Amino acid sequence: MIAGVAGVSIVVGCFGALIQTSVRRFLAYTSINQGGFLLIGLITGSLAGLQAALLYTTVYLISLLLFVIAILESKLPSDNILDIRKMPPMYRIGLVLSLFSMAGVPPMFGFVSKYVV
């Protein structure tokens, strides 16, 4: 049952994030997605699964922290995702790196943690 919840969480989080125009709602849906991956590591009930979940959580928290810092420091005028185009280049690079890591794009650390889970 928990595996089903994890799978639904991954699917809902992934497709829900694709259609968002608000940065806050986008982060909420990506958090739902990440929670599903965390559950996959925990439902194994083994030490290796727990270690994978801990690694995944650490990598996700670092990526999320980078994302939030880039958003807050750039002082976006609104919550609209399209306003990201108005960010200074250094903040956009940090934002892209954190999003690639959260999405699990190789060779980012997010890919490694998802692979371990």
Image: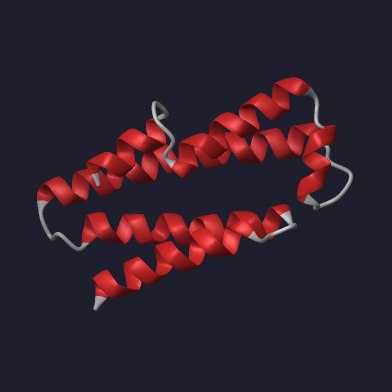
* Residue 89: % across, % down: 75, 22
In this rendering, the answer to whether 22 lies above or below 115 is below
* Residue 5: % across, % down: 34, 73
- Using the rendered view, name the quadrant where residue 7 is placed: bottom left
Q: In the depicted view, which residue is nearer to us: 60 or 81?
A: 81
Residue projecting furthest to the left: 46
Residue under the point 76% across and 48% down: 81
Q: In the depicted view, which residue is nearer to us: 85 or 35?
A: 85
In this rendering, the answer to whether 20 lies above or below 105 is below
Q: Is residue 55 visible?
A: no
| For residue 83, side relative to residue 72 (left or right) | right
* Residue 59: % across, % down: 40, 37
What is the number of callouts on the image?
0
| For residue 82, side relative to residue 98 (left or right) | right
Residue projecting furthest to the bottom: 1
Residue under the point 39% across and 26% down: 107
